[in-house]
Structures are given as C-alpha cells and as structure tokens.
Amino acid sequence: MADLLWALIGLLCLLVCLRVWRRVHYRSFWLLVGYPLTALSVRATWRKVALGCGLTKKRQRWWFTLTPGAVASTGLVKVRRRFQRVAVDTKPWMWLPKPTRYGWRVTLHTLEGQIPEDYAEAAERLAHSWRVHAIRVSSPRPGRVVLAATMRDPLVRIDQVPASSELLKVTVGRLETGKSWVIDFRTVPHWMNAGATQSGKSNLANALIVGLAPQPVALVGFDLKGGVEFTPYAPRLSALATCRAESVRLLDDLVALMVDRMGLCRQAGARNIWQLPPAIRPVPIVALVDELAELYLMADKSEKDEIAKTSTALLRVAQLGRAFGIYLFCCGQRIGSDLGPGVTALRAQCSGRICHRVNDPETATMTLGDLDPAALVSARSIAAETPGVAIVASQDGQWYRARSFYVAEHAAEHAARMYADLTPSWAELTEGIHDAEINDADLDELLNA
C-alpha cells in the first residue's frame, strides 16, 4: 500500500513538473514532449479521421482468408474460395508530421480525383478530430497537400512593436502561423485597410506611424474627420489635409511630384528612384488616408466635379506612385462599389488587403472578394471581443488571420514628437514642381514605367 501511495505521489509530482515546464517554456516542452506524442497520435488516428472526414476512396483489393469453408456469392452461384476481391477504404498517404512553432504540419499525397479544396472544406472537421485550434491547407505542387495545424491561438497575446530595421518595412503584428506580420511598402506599395469602429483599424495606423516615424521618410495624412485622428501626429507629418478641398490640393502636389521625379529618373536613365544614386534619391513618401469613403460621397451635384478630380488624382497616385517612391495606406469603415467606379479602380491597384471586423458583407467582399471565398468566411467570423484581429492578404500570395500590436494613441503621439526633427518640409519637397505642365506624353511615360 505504501509503494502504491509513493507511486501516486511521484506521478503527481511528474504531472506538476510537466505543467510548470509547459507554462514556463512552452517551446522546449512542445518539441521534447508535446510534439512526439502528437505525431504518434496523428499517425495512429489518420485512417479513422480520414474516413470520418470523407477523404478516403473505395478501391478493390484482393483479400485472402483462412476461414474454413469461406463462401463468396457472385449473385448467381455460391463458390468456395479463399482469394476474394473486396472494396477497401484507402486513406491518403501521410508523411511524418513535422513540428512548427505553434503546432505541426504534415504532407499528404492526394488520391485520384481529389483537389486541395476537398481538404480545405474538411479543415474544420480535421481540427475538431485532432483537438487543435485550426488547420490551414496549402498545396505546394500537384498531388501534394500540406496540413498546417495550430495547437493554440497565437493571437491571444501579442508583444510590443519591435523596432524596424529596414526602410519602409514595419512589423505591425503577428500572423496566425506565429510569424511576424510585416507591411513592406517596397514589396507591396499600396494597401487597403477596412474595418468597423473599434475593430482595430486605427490601432493598425498607430502601429504604422510608430514604425515609420524613426525612418527617413515623409508622411502625409488625409484625415476626412476634420483632422481629429491625425492632428496629434502633426509633428511627424509633412502635410495634412482635413477636408476634401485640401485633399485635392495635396493630391495635386503628389501628382506633380511624380512628374518631377519622372524627369529626374529619365535624366539618370533609371526606371525608378531606387536605381538612383543615394545622393540624389528623393525622399520616399507614405500617404495615410483615413475615412476613404468621405472622398467619394456626394451631398449634391455641386460636388461632382470636385469628387471626380479627387478620384482621378488618387487613382493616378496608386497607378504611378510605386516607381517614384509614393505609397498609399487607405483606411475606411465602409468601402463598397456603390461609392462609384473610382473606388473599384483604386481597389484594383491596392494589392495589399486588410479586413478587420466589418458591419456589412459588401465591405468584406470589396476588400477580399477577389482573393479567396474562404477569406470572406473567416473575415465575417471575427468577434467584436478581439479588436485588432484581421484577415490579411500577405505578400506571399496567401491570406492569413493576423492581429496587430496594441499601440495606444499616446504612444504614437510620443513617437511623432520624438522624431519630429526627421520630418521633411513639404514646402521644400514641392518647391518648383508645379512649373512643369502635366501632359499626355508624361502620363503615358509614367504608366509604362
């Protein structure tokens, strides 16, 4: 009896030690204890899980039985034989699962007639069968499917904004895979960020300002709320437009800057400003647009010409700005095709897409609809209790669930004041740019650059 008691005490101590180890250093616990047990369990249960999720195929197999007097019926006569052809449920071939930071991934060989979408439709059933948080499906090449399982949600807790090490690249949060969520304007020049009130849309803009403030770039703002959002960051903004009339003038300056930089690149024989020598390379410009819909809403017909001019200028910046170091980050609560063809054309130029929780399906469709239908389903399932969570079209061509770092307004204001000395003067940047006329030949050359 004493030996049994001591065995129970030892087992209890072992369980407590494992639990403490798991909480203190989850990564080592997962690699040394959690992963081996999980890999064995996944391989052992794969046949039953595949059968339950409808991922098996019926195949005819020869079957040999030692049962005396085995009888097989052909429908007409009964014959005694020990070799029989029977229908067997065949599962897809599974390789050994490999560990990842927050789970595991495994490669499968698809069966005849199967496509990756069959596994994507069964992803939720697979996640429940293996008791994991989520499973994402990808296909690196024909005939192969990779299941990436996440054991726990990596977006529950997120860290502080890390310092940016490269120009125009900011780490703003974390992806569901555990990797950093990076906005790189050199790779993806223009972004569209949609989200309802309190969804985390403004917080993402704060994270972007904190990341870009210490970099040698010019920041300009379009704040159609009368300036209440971006005015606190004015020390780090080279220019700020708070109404549509000011937006038209600021967009005219950006278009004129593009023409001026086009001439500079043409003289140096460069296709973009990054091929210019650093001594004469112009300052990159990031334009932050808040409440995008306000640029397109029309109260009466008297605003029609102004809206058309705004829409055309913004579209020109989106079409031509990348080569000349002008980048867009457009935010809005409501982004729909009912705002006019200008929004649809702008959306086509914004290859970076971010969709937070939205109030209407049209905004989610406008932001993510041309990427993947599954992304729409995931975007509509974002809970109001998880601000900052969004669906992101990443620069690798796939979409991910992500969450931005929490950046309070006072932190962004502090960064704007701290790096105010790095703010380029807008008057100096635009000096003499309106002397040259913008003609059709210039625009054609810009479009073909």
Image (cartoon, rainbow, N blue to C red):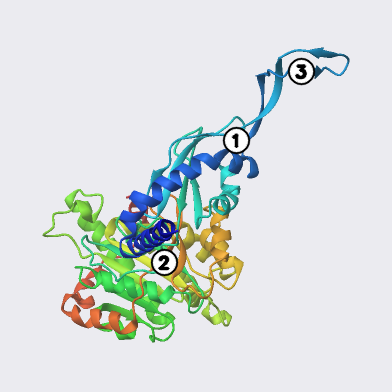
For the residue pair 15 and 129, the one nearer the viewer reads as: 15
> What whole-number distance in Å separates the C-alpha atoms at marks 2 and 1?
33 Å
Q: Can residue 112 be seen by looking at this rendering?
A: yes
Residue positioned 44% across, 67% down in the render:
193
The residue identified by callout 1 is: 114
Q: Can residue 187 be seen by looking at this rendering?
A: no
Is disc 3 surrounded by few (<14), some (14 to 19) or many (20+) residues within 10 Å? few
**Callouts 2 and 1 close, C-beta under 8 Å:** no
Residue positioned 58% across, 82% down in the render:
300
Q: State the SS at label 3.
A: loop
The residue identified by callout 2 is: 403
Q: Identify residue type, mark 3.
A: Ala
Residue reaching furthest to the right? 76
> What whole-number distance in Å separates the C-alpha atoms at marks 3 and 1?
36 Å
Residue 44 against residue 384 in the figure, above or below: above
The residue identified by callout 3 is: 70
Q: Is residue 39 left or right of residue 448?
A: right
